Image (cartoon, coloured by chain):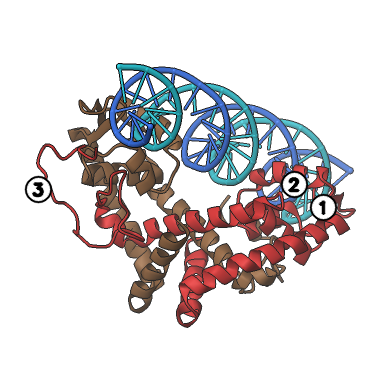
Chain colours: A red, B brown, C cyan, D blue
Amino acid sequence: MRRKNERKNGSERRKGRRGDPPGRPAPDARGEAIDYGPLAGWVGFNLRMAQAAAFQAFSRLAKEIGTRPGRFATLMLIGRNPGISQTALSRANGRDKSSLTPVLNDLARRGLIRRRRLRSDQRAYRLTLTPTGRRLLGELTRCARAHERTLDRIVGAREQDGFLRALKRIIAELG
Amino acid sequence: MRRKNERKNGSERRKGRRGDPPGRPAPDARGEAIDYGPLAGWVGFNLRMAQAAAFQAFSRLAKEIGTRPGRFATLMLIGRNPGISQTALSRANGRDKSSLTPVLNDLARRGLIRRRRLRSDQRAYRLTLTPTGRRLLGELTRCARAHERTLDRIVGAREQDGFLRALKRIIAELG
DNA sequence: AGAAAACAGTTGGATATAAAACTATTCGCC
DNA sequence: GGCGAATAGTTTTATATCCAACTGTTTTCT
């Protein structure tokens, strides 16, 4: 076993080009190192991979409570900004407003948020948390804090601040 | 709708339209600041927002060539690792192998990659780029380099290295 | 050798998301 | 006051993605 694609040459050696596959050596199925080429040094690619990894780690945690990361940010933003509109909310968490419709339908159906029309503007909703929603938000917040501690440890206290500010610059300039 | 919707202003303060970095003033639809609560200081949330922003910026660029960011990494990995299997590829770019099936079908249909069965293992495919695929990869690479320059500028040369290494630590430890 | 386990890839079901077209309401301006 | 543009939210359509179940192949174990 393990005689796969190197019968052709074995000295094809394209590894170590940059010596830096994102993360670990990144063995492929059989322990062969993957060549990431320029991807290895690019912010965009590593940002995508890191986000996916962190997101999935948090998903696993949040699943036990029965919710997903996207819901968490939504609940937090509504909790912190009672009366916020869907459009403002969609901007605040960086997603299209149309993506929010099914999420809010679900949250409302489960009794976590309330949606009332504004008297002054019959098009818009005022979003608020219900007591149940507040309770769930509390649980999720505890859960998220655990995740954050892990991330903080990985990033490291010394670099934490610069790291966060770099992320915020990206958000600000490309958002 | 460009900027014609602000004839309503006159006395409209509307500062910082494009700056809603969590932790910053972050105006909502009507110029109200959004309260991000603890999200503002969390790595996880900012990672998600930054990735989404960068991804969309690159999408806009790549769309002109007629491909999407996910395809780009796929092509690059195949180009750099000719003969790679689908499973190894899926691991290398951090997605489930089942996500790859439709992507590879499409790339093959468009004549960008070739898929051949291994003689030694009739289950697996050997993936390689066609000349057309190599050409498209080249175009996309140029396009991606432009995007990378933007990101590098935003992150800043001084912090670039630490930033990238922090991302890689996250990938390695949570992947 | 033969059965069981491991593995490569696909399929089907579910969620998340974006973009564009749509409906209903409000606002700006004459 | 009324018309046309802007706005809030929804619907529709299309992708991307995961997970679990599945098919067929290879390896492992006895």
Q: Position of residue B136 (x, y in %)?
A: 25, 40
- Quarter where residue D12 is shown: top right
Say which amino acid is labelled 3: Ser
The first of marks 2 and 3 along the sequence is 3
Residue occupied by mark 2 = A104
Q: Are marks 1 and 2 in contact (CB under 8 Å)?
A: yes
Q: Position of residue A63 (x, y in %)?
A: 66, 50
Estimate the spatial distance between the alpha carbons at disc 1 and disc 2, rounded to whole Å. Answer: 8 Å
Compared to residue A27, the image places residue B150 above or below, namely below
Tell me the subunit letter for badge 3: A
The first of marks 3 and 1 along the sequence is 3
Q: Is residue B110 visible?
A: no
Compared to residue D20, the image places residue A142 above or below, namely below
Residue closer to the observer: A31 or D11: A31
How many residues crowd mark 3 within 10 Å: few (<14), some (14–19), many (20+)? few
The first of marks 1 and 2 along the sequence is 2
How many residues crowd mark 2 within 10 Å: few (<14), some (14–19), many (20+)? many
Left or right relative to C24: residue A63: left
Q: Is residue B115 visible?
A: yes
Q: Which mark is residue A11?
A: 3
Say which amino acid is labelled 1: Ile
Q: Do dots 3 and 1 share one subunit?
A: yes
How many residues crowd mark 1 within 10 Å: few (<14), some (14–19), many (20+)? many
The residue drawn where x is 45% and y is 59% is A50
Say which amino acid is labelled 2: Leu
Tell me the subunit letter for badge 2: A
Estimate the spatial distance between the alpha carbons at disc 3 and disc 1, rounded to whole Å. Answer: 61 Å
Residue occupied by mark 1 = A113
User: Element at badge 2?
Assistant: helix
The residue drawn where x is 44% and y is 44% is B95
